[in-house]
């Protein structure tokens, strides 16, 4: 890899790292091609950019971005997963693979410029996903309207039941 290629990689990574909400670093040493392919596919489906990066290039890319906190973890084989809007989905996928594959080890992560360790990533993976949270919020906002409709519908229903009961008693 020549100097211009390295500069392009640093510029591209730096741009991506300045835009992401979260980034996770892992040691991928010891996992086979099939496992990496499955991991990449799952992360890509979740909208996550996953790359194997040279540590020196990652350190240069992180300078001046919120991912600078990850600089101390750039040792040994390093793969980085960069997440945009949904930070829980990649954490869930990475933790799942770290549990399945003993060789795949989560080093650290960055969430909104703050450093989180491997345990923090595991805790993040236990949170509900963005879609689940949106569904719960929508359900909470919809509940008062549904209750109001039910209450308003109960008044005519009760009137009809009373009139029906009066009609039945007069018929008997």
Image (cartoon, grey):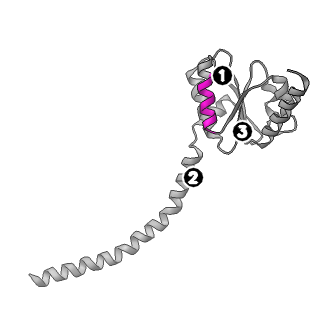
Q: Of residues 41 and 141, which is closer to you in this image? A: 41
Q: Which residues are magenta?
A: 36-46
Q: Is residue 32 above or below residue 125?
A: above
At mark 3, the secondary structure is strand
Q: Position of residue 36 (x, y in %)?
A: 63, 23
At mark 1, the secondary structure is strand
Residue found at the far right of this picture: 3
Provide the residue designation for mark 1. 105
Q: Is residue 154 above or below residue 47?
A: below
Disc 3 residue crowd, few under 14, some 14–19, many 20+, Cα 10 Å:
many
Q: Position of residue 12 (x, y in %)?
A: 82, 35
Residue 22's tag is 3
At x 68%, y 16%, the residue is 29
Provide the residue designation for mark 2. 134
Give the Cα separation between the discs numbered 1 and 2: 31 Å
Q: Is residue 51 left or right of residue 133?
A: right
First of labels 3, 2 by sequence position: 3
Q: Is residue 77 left or right of residue 136?
A: right
Residue found at the far left of this picture: 172
Mark 1 in CB contact with mark 2 (< 8 angstroms)? no
Q: Position of residue 75 (x, y in %)?
A: 79, 20
Give the Cα separation between the discs numbered 3 and 1: 17 Å
Q: Of residues 83 and 162, which is closer to you in this image? A: 83
Q: Is residue 95 left or right of residue 15?
A: left
């Amino acid at each position: 890899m020549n100097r211009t290629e390295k500069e392009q990689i640093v510029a591209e990574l730096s741009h991506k790292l300045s835009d992401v909400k979260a980034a996770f670093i892992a040691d991928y040493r010891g996992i086979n091609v099939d496992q990496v392919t499955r991991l990449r596919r799952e992360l890509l489906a979740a909208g996550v950019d996953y790359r194997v990066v040279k540590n020196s290039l990652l350190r240069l890319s992180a300078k001046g971005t919120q991912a600078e906190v990850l600089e101390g973890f750039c040792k040994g084989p390093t793969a980085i997963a960069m997440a945009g809007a949904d930070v829980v989905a990649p954490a869930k996928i990475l933790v799942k693979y770290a549990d399945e594959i003993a060789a795949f080890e989560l080093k650290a992560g960055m969430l909104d410029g703050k450093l989180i360790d491997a345990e923090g990533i595991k805790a993040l993976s236990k949170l509900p996903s963005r879609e689940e949270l949106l569904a719960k919020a929508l359900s909470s906002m919809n509940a008062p309207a549904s209750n109001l409709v039910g209450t308003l519908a109960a008044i005519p229903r009760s009137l009809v039941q009373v009139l029906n009961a009066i009609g039945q008693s007069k018929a008997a």
